């Protein structure tokens, strides 16, 4: 049993450094999402490919919104999108645009979109 | 007539029980046989004259030897070999670290072709096999192949698994193309399937660690009531079970498989749909074959114990990964990592 403890430490070191290394290089296009207001409706654009970009969007509360999800040769999990708060669950086309309507939201509401296997997600904050 | 109880060494699956019984039943001295997987024992009733129990055990062992079982009077000791973990844990950690790093490399961006052709389908398959789908399909392949290898059959069951997988991807892909509708699970269905996958992987993984003798019961096999009525029992478990699992991978939760199926839908043709899914499966083959046949190179018993324990740890990691993901995907717990 004694010989197991150092090997557990080695294991923690290996996996820990893999996580640390990967999270450092992991912020490709973080930034404000492109949000435009057209005819009193705000348009929240999100790119779905190997994750969702931007991972966090800030939107205005109290306005009807439309979520515009762009896919471009997307074959990974991000094409299997579910938004539990909206009861939305569908597989997006491999390339194209999908529009999802969102009713006006209360301030400080957060809507989360997740891919079907759970490893990619994005959030929209309303305020 | 007298009844004897022997311990069976090497009887590790449901089919083995039926095989042990059917082999011993044919002996002229034997009146009745009842083997039991839980206690790893066999109860033999018959007329053996005044032979000592030790002699009977030795005589019956000769008959069972070709199947790899031996009988003994004493309960064989179970040795967990804790020391092997000192090597197995770092090996598993390296594998898990590679898996985490692969997710971050952005391999999905390799797929940039707007027109999906058969070439793209192959690349999507390649990428899928190193993606998070590895946690589902790869975990299943690793645990099943390791469990079969532990039982002594390293090559053939996995050969049937992959053949059945390729054939069923062609046929099911063709059906999707021809019918123009796709099999899709709802939120509850996905959660249930995800939980089943996680649970099965957890059991198989713990089984591979070989620390709990009672875990032998949870082997990959068809229920006894089916295997009992089919001849060539060993064959059934080693052909039908892996083949069925190969077909099942078509329906397992994996984003790549699902979006390929959705693309197949648009082909509107049996042949084009079937070929697309077949080539996608072909793309996943190199990595899955590596996980399936990696045990072929391990011959010594000391090494195989280490490798089975490493595989067990990796499979348990995949099981927990799937469990958390299934819960995150339904919104029960908030997402905590963005792989």
Image (tube, coloured by chain):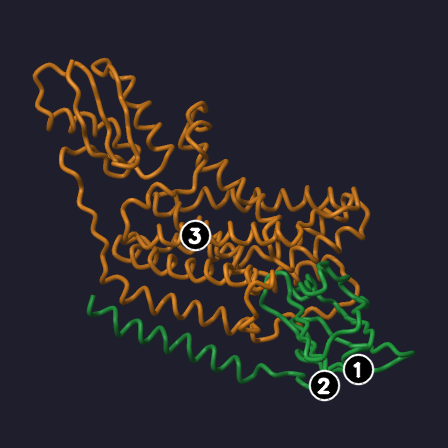
Q: Please report contact status of discs 1 and 3: CB closer than 8 Å, yes or no.
A: no
Tell me where residue B36 appears, x and y as whole percent. Answer: 29, 31
In the rendered image, which residue does mark 2 sit on? Answer: A32
Numbered disc 1: secondary structure: strand
- Which chain letter matches label 1? A
Chain coloured green in the rendered structure: A
With respect to residue B129, does B232 lie above or below?
A: above
Tell me where residue A14 appears, x and y as whole percent. Answer: 39, 76
Tell me where residue B109 appears, x and y as whole percent. Answer: 67, 73
Residue A65: image quadrant is bottom right
The one of A34 and A24 positioned closer to us in this rendering: A34
Q: Tell me, what hue is chain B?
A: orange
Numbered disc 3: secondary structure: helix
Numbered disc 2: secondary structure: loop
With respect to residue B66, does B135 lie above or below?
A: below
With respect to residue B5, does B306 lie above or below?
A: below
The answer for how far apart the CA atoms under marks 1 and 3 are is 47 Å
In the rendered image, which residue does mark 1 sit on? Answer: A35
């Amino acid at each position: 049993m004694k010989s197991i403890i150092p090997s557990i430490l080695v294991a923690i070191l290996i996996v820990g450094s893999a996580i640390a290394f990967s999270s450092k290089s992991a912020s490709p296009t973080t930034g404000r999402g492109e949000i435009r207001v057209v005819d009193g409706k705000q348009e929240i654009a999100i790119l779905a490919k190997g994750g969702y970009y931007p991972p966090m969007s800030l939107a205005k509360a109290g306005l009807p919104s439309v979520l515009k999800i762009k896919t471009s040769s997307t074959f990974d999990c991000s094409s299997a999108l579910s938004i539990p708060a909206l009861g939305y669950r569908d597989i997006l086309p491999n390339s194209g645009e999908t529009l999802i309507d969102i009713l006006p939201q209360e301030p400080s509401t957060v809507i989360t979109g997740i891919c079907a296997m759970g490893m990619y997600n994005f959030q929209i904050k309303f305020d | 007539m007298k009844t004897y109880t022997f311990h069976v060494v090497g009887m590790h699956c449901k089919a083995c029980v039926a095989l042990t019984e059917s082999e011993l039943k044919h002996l002229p001295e034997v009146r009745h046989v009842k083997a039991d997987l839980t206690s790893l024992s066999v109860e033999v009733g018959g007329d053996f004259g005044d032979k000592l129990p030790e002699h009977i055990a030795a005589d019956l062992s000769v008959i069972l030897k070709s199947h790899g079982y031996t009988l003994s009077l004493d309960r064989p000791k179970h040795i967990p070999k804790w020391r092997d973990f000192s090597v197995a844990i770092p090996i598993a950690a390296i594998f898990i670290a590679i898996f985490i790093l692969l997710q971050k490399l952005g391999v999905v961006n390799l797929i940039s072709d707007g027109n999906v052709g058969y070439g793209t389908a192959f690349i999507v398959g390649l990428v899928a096999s190193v993606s998070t789908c590895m946690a589902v399909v790869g975990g299943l392949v690793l645990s099943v192949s390791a469990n079969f290898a532990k039982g002594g059959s390293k090559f053939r069951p996995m050969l049937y698994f992959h053949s059945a997988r390729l054939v069923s991807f062609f046929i099911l892909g063709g059906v999707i193309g021809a019918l123009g509708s796709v099999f899709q699970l709802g939120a509850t269905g996905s959660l249930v399937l995800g939980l089943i996958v996680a649970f099965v992987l957890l059991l198989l993984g713990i089984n591979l660690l070989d620390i709990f003798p009672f875990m032998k019961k949870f082997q990959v096999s068809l229920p006894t009531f089916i295997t009992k009525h089919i001849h060539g029992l060993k064959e059934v478990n080693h052909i039908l079970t892996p083949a069925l699992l190969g077909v099942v991978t078509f329906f397992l939760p994996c984003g790549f498989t699902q979006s390929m199926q959705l693309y197949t839908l648009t082909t509107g043709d049996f042949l084009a749909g079937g070929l697309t899914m077949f080539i996608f499966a072909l793309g996943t083959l190199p990595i899955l074959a590596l996980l399936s046949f990696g045990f072929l190179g391990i011959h010594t018993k000391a090494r195989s114990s280490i490798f089975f324990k490493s595989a067990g740890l990796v499979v348990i990691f995949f099981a927990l990964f799937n469990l958390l993901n299934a819960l995150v995907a339904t919104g029960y717990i908030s997402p905590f990592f963005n792989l």
